[in-house]
Amino acid sequence: MFAFVGLGGTDEVGASSYLYLLKEGNLLIDAGLRPGQMGEAALPQLERLQEHPPSAMILTHAHLDHVAALPVVTRRYPNLPIYCTEATARIAALVLADTLKVSTEQGYPMFSAGEMKRSLERLRPIPYFQRITDHGFAFELYPSGHLLGAASVLIVSGGRTVFHTGDVSNVDTPVVNAAWMPTQVTAVDAVVSESTYGDTLLPSRKEQVRTFVSAIGETLQAGGRVLIPSFALGRAQEITQILHTAMASGLLPAAPIHLDGLTRAMTQAYEDMLPLLPKPLQNRRQSSGQPVFLSGTVHLVSNRQDRERIIASDQAAVVVASSGMLHAGASPQYARAWLPHPENALFVVGYQDAESPGRRLLELQQGGDVSLPDGQGGRELIPAYARVERFYLSAHADRGGLLGMIARYSPGKVLLTHGELGPRANLAGYLNSKYEVSLPGTGEVVELQDSGRRRGSFLNTAPRKLEALKERHARGKVAVRYDAAQHQVVIQLPQELDGQLFGEGEYTLEVLRGKLSRIKLRERDQEALAGMEDQADSQGPTK
């Protein structure tokens, strides 16, 4: 057996959980929750584990959408060995404690304190690049960027290999180095890749940081207050470093920086894990003798009274608060108070899922109303007159980064997960001219072995026969039309060519970035397209 089952996090960003059905046993990777959901709706399809009990489990990193359902798994499999890096083990304890606190307040506790404790006791921290062979199959963890301690996984089973990217970033940040990649092409049977930004070419990170700092400076100099809803893990610490450096160098006026919500505990944890952080941060601590994150103008919001004082103050300030999508936590409280005032600003710096208040806010015209959590289990419409902008400081690789990484592993087959319909389909369009590509649905069993038909093999005929075919069809009629809706020139080949000179499907010349900058011959897999159309229909109309 050499197959993959996505229990969650396939055609969505949330509830990530992936099961590998291997010859020697089954390997479970991650068990997360869906942000913004409660109770059973937040969980992956963990009931599928009854059919295929796991022999071992790996946590790729400690974000809520990958780790927060861990106690639910260990409730069912109390002796399951769980592997992760040291940083992931330490951070997971904080994420699970916060998940228990929030879900209990919402009235839908996902697990008990005892179950959380027992799940943490099952963690087996291992270093990167150490091969584990205790379960018949073998695996290694590689640095994946994205987050402190985050890992990709190379799995070896029955002489076959699959590379599971996890959440991956190919860009260095102040708090984590870029993903490791082999110096030479390393062929594997399959790559299972995330596709969060599969339809996006992200702008230069350096330029985004510059404009981000400039926008904050404009708001502070005008006496406004800046709210940065942020993921507590990684992103909050990166933002803190950017602000600290900009203020120290005079690019930003001095102003208090307040950390609220889960960002407080996480930033303190990062201080304690300094030996695991990039060398420049370690060197700075050694030379200055001061804390790396909690020094200067950085303050922790310690209680509700402290938060209310900051909200009511008219002093220019920056608040970095969880959650990053405004689903819950402290950030909606600041947003409800500050969004109605045009002198303030709210800057989005991370991914926003389709149903998040953060995504809705970005789609608004200035002055429109956004529905935010009211802190009591309900929602409140808030007018948004403040400056709202998005800056791409993502911890995920964009389309170019993903294509480059996948090419480095030269897979026979590629499975795309961890992405909404559009990004997955777009990335698949760039991949399916060279690889066999699958877009698995939740619960679908997908074979990991290449079927033997590479989609790049357009010219699948012997050279002599190919020349004869070319001559035979040299005078064939070729129809060309322009599809304005898709901004494509469509070339329709003579019917006689189907299945001979070219594979079945429709081929297009794509117009990229407003001009014909590249010609690409792409086969459109009609079955795959039909499947995507069915999926879109089942989700209802897009608002």
Image (spheres, helix red, strand yellow):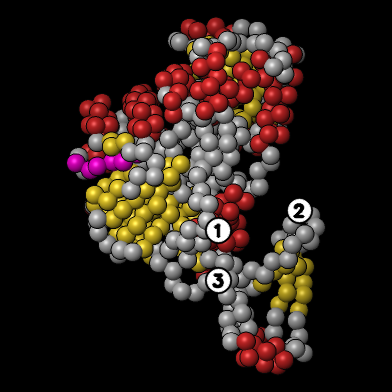
Q: Is residue 339 magenta?
A: no
Q: Is residue 80 magenta?
A: yes
- Mark 2 touches mark 3? (CB < 8 Å): no
Instruction: Give percent across and percent down for residue 234.
Output: 50, 30
Inspect this view and state whether residue 364 appears.
no
Q: Which kind of residue does numbered mark 2 sit on?
A: Arg
Q: Which residue is mark 1?
A: 407
Identity of the residue furthest to the right in this view: 515
Mark 2: secondary structure: loop
User: Is 486 in front, or is 128?
Assistant: 128
At a point 69% along the width and 17% down the height, the residue shown is 249
How many C-alpha atoms fall within 10 Å of the one at disc 1: few (<14), some, or many (≥20)? some
Q: Which residue is mark 2?
A: 513
Q: Compare marks 2 and 1 and give the one earlier in the sequence.
A: 1
User: Where the N terminus falls, by quadrant?
Assistant: bottom left
Instruction: Give percent across and percent down for residue 9.
Output: 43, 47
Point out the stretch of residues depicted in magenta: 79-84
Q: Which residue is mark 3?
A: 455
Instruction: Give percent across and percent down for residue 31.
Output: 35, 42
Q: Nearer the viewer, mark 2 or mark 1?
A: 1
At a point 43% along the width and 35% down the height, the residue shown is 149
